[in-house]
Image: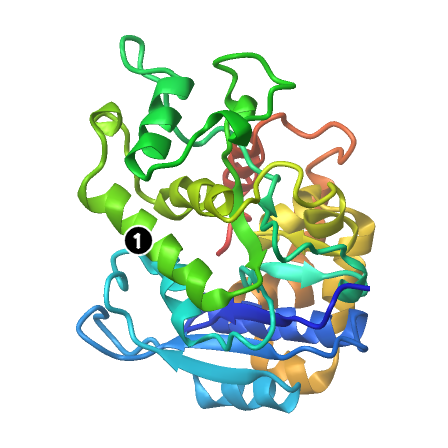
Amino acid sequence: MSEVFNIVIVAQAGRLEYEALVFAASLRAKSPKFKGRLLVCEPQPGPKWNSDPRMGSEVREALESMGAEILPFANEHFGQDYPNGNKIECLKVVPTDRPFVFFDTDTLVLDDIRKVPFDFDRPAASMRRESTWPQIELYGPGYHATWESLYRQFGLEMDSALDKSWPEEFWRRYPYFNAGFFYHRDAAAFGARYLEIALGIRDTRPAELVCQEIWPWLDQIALPLVLHSFGGGFGALEDGWLDGRTTCHYRVLPLLYARESEAVISVIEEVTAPNKIKKILKNYDPIKRMVYQGRGKKVRALFDQNDLPRKEQGIRNRIKKEGFWMR
């Protein structure tokens, strides 16, 4: 078993508060012996938000009834224009007495989270990703030159960060991850470096990035550099644990029903079934339609789960064409 650690998620008014409730329900159902704290970081009203981002009282009370602790934090650098930045800024309020694991709220816990062999001195992130960044231009820098410019900007060597089982200029050779989970021993140190690197890319990007769009991928561009600076990255966590048999980062409910296993579908339908949680989740249309009214099963029937489109966009397009896309 891993040492005791805290779990961190970010929730705010709208989609994320309902996803947070489902996440908490799955954690309690599938990992009942988890001894750490479930910390729900909540952005507070301020100049970076056009409206109050705080959760509703009903969701807040339900989370607290499941043992979650709400940690308020202020946005100084990101906010309405880039809510992905919450996962960076929230770390400043996370206690440092234990290691932490951050999860996006659109994640389900499927099994005992304590079994995951975390090495909190070698941080990792999700390998369930596609080649969304960088987009290589015909006459522009390739993958190597683009990534190397970032490592150089922050005083990091890149060679040991590469996965050399893949050839030069193939995207999988380069350290790009999904930011749906990450972890480390010290939330404050990790968050400070994450913020430093993200702001550096945003404000003073190297010349090799002049043709690259950094939104909404900034958090995922910065993350590999942060992991590498703390001695992590490729190979720090054995494949198959997170975004595998222990958790599922489903991201959008129609995608969950289209491509995930029957076991994942059983978990989401099990943990959302109790009346106490159902009456709250019914206020969120995608859960109401997909889970409770059976639209998810209609989405699933559109696909052969053993022969899915190679790219996620192909799955999305089919769902949208049939009128079932919801988020």
Residue at screen point 71% across, 72% down: 4
Q: Position of residue 173 (x, y in %)?
A: 55, 23
- Residue 186: horizontal and vertical position, in percent? 52, 65
Image quadrant of residue 206?
top left
The front one of 244 and 260 is 244
Q: Which residue is mark 1?
A: 196
Identify which residue is drawn at 69% across, 42% down: 259
Front residue of 292 and 272: 272
Q: Is residue 86 above or below residue 53?
A: above
Q: Quadrant of residue 36?
A: bottom right
Q: Residue at x 27, y 8 (%)?
A: 139
Few, some or many residues within 10 Å of mark 1 (<14, 14–19, 20+): some
Residue 235 position within the rendered picture, expressed as x and y whole percent measured from the top left: 67, 38
Q: Is residue 283 left or right of residue 197?
A: right
Res. 272 in view? no
Q: Is residue 106 visible?
A: yes
Pick whichever, 222 or 228, lies toward us: 228
- Disc 1 element: helix
Reply above or below: 68 against 324. below
Residue 83 lies, in percent from the top left, at: 34, 60
Q: Nearer the viewer, residue 23 or 226?
A: 226
- Please name the amino acid that badge 1 sits on: Glu
Q: Which image quadrant: the N terminus?
A: bottom right
